[in-house]
Image (cartoon, rainbow, N blue to C red):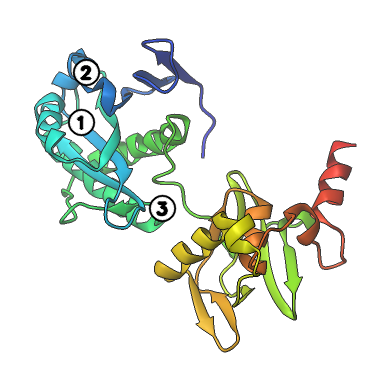
Amino acid sequence: MSTATIKLFLANGDPKRLRTGEISNWSGKAVAAPRTDLDELLAREELQKPGVYILIGTDPNEGSPACYIGEAEVIRDRLKQHRAKDFWIHVIVFVSKDENLTKSHIRYLEGRLIVGAQEADRFQVVNSQTSGSKLPESDREEMEVFLGKIRQLLPVLGSDILTPRPQATDVVAGPANHLVCEIKGLKANGRRTEDGFVVFAGSQAVKELRPSAPVRHSFVVKLRNDLSIDGTLAGQGDYLVFTRDAEFSSPSAAAAVVSGGGANGLTMWRTNDGITLKKLEGKADS
């Protein structure tokens, strides 16, 4: 991914409220806002243009992150219709400053965004069908560049909807990038990530929670329950196995799920030579 200079403007001085995002030498522009600022968002000039948008929230039935990806020739009119969707709490809109986006362009971008979100598998995409549009080769390449800028801006605007989950194959050389957590003859593998810690598919976890977990570490109970419901943790004999990579907010949260109770991830995660994550990071700071 190429380097980029990003300009953010906070319309109300609050980073969580309405804000715009631009990248140097890019014809596009992003406008993001919480649902509570929807009226202010709809009043903006950018919303009169064609573009794509992402509604972000939580599925009311499963409690998991959910999104809806759409396109419209007049974004304002379409977003007004989405007041009826109660799951979303945030919206991000992408338009072109030079007004060169056609209906075919935005349908192509919508389709690519839907596929990208499904592949990243961080959010449930609630669209009923995959959109898209065929474009001439030159237009398609231009829209792929536009999509690349969207990918760069989304995390800056607070959404990782297109950010691929870390994979075991992404591990590069270095002891801190391949750590193990061993307990009761079971072994889990993982590494630090930009967002916390990932436990790789195939890792093992204890089957039974510690007696103290429901009282002192209820978050572990919820995490393991959620991972079991979505199929990430599955029973295999007298232990559990991760069926796919799972990302956690910290090494301790990851170790707690593996061990079935409260855990200090800085000491439980170690290199194959037995060096703790705490010691590795201490060396990096020294």
Residue 38 appears at what percent x and percent y? 22, 23
Looking at the image, the residue that sits furthest to the front is 215
Q: Which of disc 1 and disc 3 is earlier in sequence?
A: 1
Dot 2: few (<14), some (14–19), or many (≥20) neighbours within 10 Å? many
In front here: 210 or 195? Answer: 210
Q: Residue at x 39, y 45 (%)?
A: 161
Q: Which amino acid does label 2 sit on?
A: Glu
- In the picture of the structure, the residue carrying the numbered disc 1 is 51
Give the side of residue 220 with respect to residue 119, left or right: right
Secondary structure, mark 3, is loop
Q: Which of disc 3 and disc 2 is earlier in sequence?
A: 2
Q: For the residues carrying marks 2 and 3, which lies nearer the camera in this image?
A: 3
Q: Which amino acid does label 1 sit on?
A: Gly
Quarter of image, res 199: bottom right
Q: Which amino acid does label 3 sit on?
A: Arg
Label 2 and label 3: CA atoms lie apart by 28 Å
Looking at the image, the residue that sits furthest to the bottom is 237
Query: Are the residues flagged by discs 1 and 2 in contact, CB closer than 8 Å?
Result: yes
Question: Mark on residue 122?
Answer: 3
The quarter of the image holding the C terminus is: top right
- In the picture of the structure, the residue carrying the numbered disc 2 is 46
Label 1 and label 2: CA atoms lie apart by 9 Å
